[in-house]
Image (spheres, grey):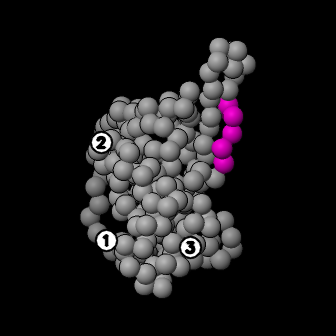
Amino acid sequence: MSERARENNAHLADGLARRVDPFEERPDVKTLKPIAVLALLGAVLVLPGCGGRWRLGPAQTRRDVYMNLMTPLQQAEYRHMEAAGKPLSLRLAYLQGIGVYQTWAEQPKEIQEAVLRREVREGMTPVQVQMAWGHPAEKRDGTLPAERAGGHSRTLWEYEIRSQGIGGSHYERSVCFYDGRVLWVRDTG
C-alpha cells in the first residue's frame, strides 16, 4: 500500500473514530461471540461451492457484454461511434460486422440472464465467461501430463479484482476450464 493510501486510510479512520461516542452502550463481547461463530459457520457452509455459481460485481447491460467480447481496438472504435453520436442502427451494424451481436444472440436464454448478472456457472464455455467477466489478466495451460495423454485439457484464467471504496481490496479469481467447460472458480488473497 502506498504512503498516500495509508495517510488517506488513517485520516478516514480518525474521522470515523471522532464520530463514536465513547460512553455509548455497546454489546458485551460474550454476547457477540456466539453470533459471530454462527455467522462464520453459516459462511463456511454456504460459500465454498456457491452452488457452482460465482458472481463478479453488479449486473451489467448488453453493451457491457458486447464490450467484453471485443478486442481493445474494437472497443475504441465502438466508443468513438458512441461519442460521435452515430445512430443505434450503425452501431448495431458494427456489432454484427465483427460478430459480437451473433455471439450474444446464439446463447441460450438462461446463459444470457446469468451473463447479465455477471454470474459464471459450472459448465460454461470460455466465450460465456468472457461475456460475463471480460478478458482475463492471464491465460495459462494447466493440463497435467496424464490429462494430456488422455486427450484432455485444462486452462486457467486469472482475473485481478479490485474493489472500490475505502481501503479498496485486491484479490485474484481463477477460473479453471476442463475440456472447454468451467470446472471451478477460486479466489485468492
Q: Is residue 77 above or below residue 70?
A: below
In the image, 114: left or right of 143? left
Counting other residues with Cα less than 10 Å from the Cα at mark 3, is it few (<14), some (14-19), or many (20 or more)?
some
Q: Is residue 162 above or below residue 104?
A: below
Q: Amino acid at mark 1?
A: Phe
At 35% from the left and 33% from the top, the residue drawn is: 51
User: Which mark is in front, 3 or 1?
Assistant: 3
Q: Which residue is mark 3?
A: 77
Q: Is residue 32 above or below residue 95?
A: above
* Disc 3 from disc 1: Cα separation: 59 Å
**Reading the chain from its start, which is encountered first: label 3 or label 2?**
3
x, y percentage for residue 113? 30, 48
User: Which mark is in front, 3 or 2?
Assistant: 3
Q: Which residue is mark 1?
A: 23
* Disc 3 from disc 2: Cα separation: 30 Å
Q: Which residue is mark 2?
A: 110
**Reading the chain from its start, which is encountered first: label 1 or label 2?**
1
Q: How many marks?
A: 3
Q: Amino acid at mark 2?
A: Glu
- Nearest to the observer: residue 52 or residue 139: 139
Residues shaded magenta: 138-142
